[in-house]
Amino acid sequence: MSLCARILFLLMDKAFVVTPDCEIKPACSDRGGSCKLTCEDKEIEIPEGCEGENCKCCMPEDNLAVCTTDASTCQGTCVDSLNCDEEVAGSTCNGTNCKCCRDCKPQEVCSNLNGVCKNRPTEECPAGEVVIVDGCTGLDCTCCAGTSGLLSCPASPACPGRCRDARVCPVVMKDTSCTTPGCTCCLDCKDQSCAQNNGVCRERGTCLDGETESTAGECTGNRCVCCKK
C-alpha cells in the first residue's frame, strides 16, 4: 500500500485516534475519552474536550455516570451532565457528573406529528402550534406541533363543546360524541382570570377533591367553571 493510500485509510478509519495534532483536555481524559476525527457508535462526544482542527473527544457510553433521583432535591431527573437537555435551577443530585435536568423526551404521538418538546410550564404553545396531550415526558415539558397533520373535526349535535382531534383534546366532555373517527368532544374553555386566582378551568361538576367550584366568570365556555384550590 502506498503512503498516500495509508494516510487516506487512516483518515477514513473512525477509530483512528488523532494524537499528533490534537491536545486532550482534562475534561476528556478524566472521563476516559480520547481525541478522534469522528466518534463511533456507542460513544458520546464531550464538548470542548480536545483542542485542534476537527478534533473531537469521544467517550464510551459505558462511562456515563449512574445517577439516582431524590424528589426532595430534584423535581426533574438526575442524569449524566452530558445527557442533560436543560438543568433545573436550584436543584442538586448525588454523584459525580450528575445534574438535575428536565429530561424532556417526545412520545410516539408527538413524533408522529413532527412535534417538539418544549419547556412550557403553563402547557401553552406558540401561535400557530397546538399542545399534543401527553406528548412529552419530563419536568414542565409540552409537545408543540403544527396543525397540518391533525384531523378535520366538524361540529356534532352530540357535542356541546368543540370536536377536535383526540390527540390535542386536554379534557373530554362526559356523555358526548363526535361523528368523525379519531375526533372527540372537548371542553372548550377560555381562561379569563382563573389561573391568576390559583384555579383551573374544568367541566362543571368535575372539580377535584380540595378544589372549590366557582361560577364567577373566571372561565367562559359551555359547562366551564373555575376550580380553585
Image (cartoon, rainbow, N blue to C red):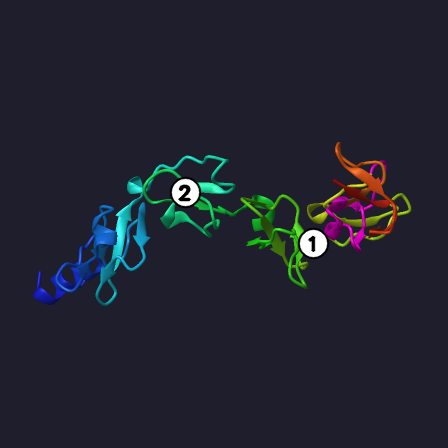
Asked whether the viewer can see residue 215, the reply is yes
Q: Nearer the viewer, residue 217 or 223?
A: 217
**Image quadrant where residue 118 sits:** bottom right
Q: Is residue 181 magenta?
A: yes
Give whichever of 15, 29 is nearer the camera: 29
Report the residue marked by disc 1.
150
Count of marks placed on residues: 2
**Which amino acid lies under the numbered mark 2 shown in the image of this protein?**
Val
Q: Residue 71: where, in percent of width, then height? A: 50, 35
The residue beneath circle 2 is 79
Q: Residues within 10 Å of mark 2 (few under 14, many from 20)?
A: many
In the image, what residue type sits under mark 1?
Leu
User: How far from the left and from the top, in percent, is residue 138?
Assistant: 54, 44
Magenta stretch bounds? 174-200
Residue 195 placement, left or right of 67: right
Q: Distance between the Cα atoms at labels 2 and 1?
A: 34 Å
Question: Where residue 52 sits: x, y (%)?
Answer: 21, 66
